[in-house]
Image (spheres, helix red, strand yellow):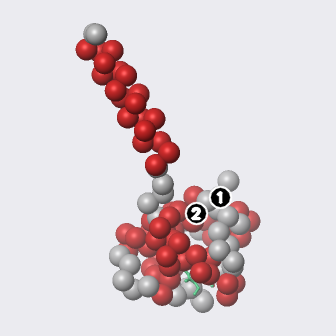
Amino acid sequence: MDKKVVTGICSLLVLSACKPAEEHPGKAIWEETCKVCHSVGLAGSPKFGDVKAWSKRIARGKESLYQHALEGWGDMPAKGGNPALSDEQVKLAVDYMVANSSE
Ligand code: HEC
């Protein structure tokens, strides 16, 4: 078989094999630390998936959301109360929540 064709078939196979396994890197972190409040809107937290509740916050800019998640804000504890998380992990969890709470 032509080498080009073989390479083409292989890349197709790789792509389709990768697709279903793709998961947001912030999902596991969110489920571990943030879900307890943000899945139900505990303590007045903006609920996961609530586009309306998030839109005003998102409008302020991602940096503001990151900062509040990292340092705490109102009843939002710093790093969701889990200091073991790295800044990068907290930001991934914010990204995951925002991606699922905006249009
Ligand atoms: C103990 C409950 C609780 C946990 C756990 C928690 N949050 Fe929150 N979060 C809140 C509350 C309450 C607010 C609303 C604060 C306010 O607006 O005064 C909030 C607000 C936020 C906001 C919006 C900040 C803004 O600038 O408007 C982000 C982003 C956020 N949380 C991210 C996270 C992430 C990421 C995690 C997990 C690492 C997490 N939260 C875990 C209670 C929690």
Q: Is residue 43 above or below residue 34?
A: below
Query: Which numbered dot is residue 98?
Result: 2
Asked if disc 2 is less than 8 Å from ligand 1, the answer is yes
Q: Residue at x 71, y 70 (%)?
A: 53
Q: CA distance from mark 2 to mark 1?
A: 6 Å
Please state which of residues 65 and 87 is positioned toward the viewer in this rendering.
87
Residue 87 is situated, as x and y percent measured from the top left of the image, at 37, 74
Q: Is residue 43 above or below residue 70?
A: below
**Callout 1 crowding tier (Cα within 10 Å): few <14, some 14–19, many ≥20:** some
Residue in the image at 40% along x and 70% along y: 89
Q: In the image, residue 13 lies at what x, y percent?
A: 40, 30
Q: Closer to the camera, 51 or 27? A: 27
> Going by the picture, which residue comes out furthest to the left?
3
Q: Is residue 58 left or right of residue 94?
A: right
**Dot label at residue 102:** 1
Asked whether disc 2 touches disc 1, contact meaning CB atoms under 8 Å apart, the reply is: yes
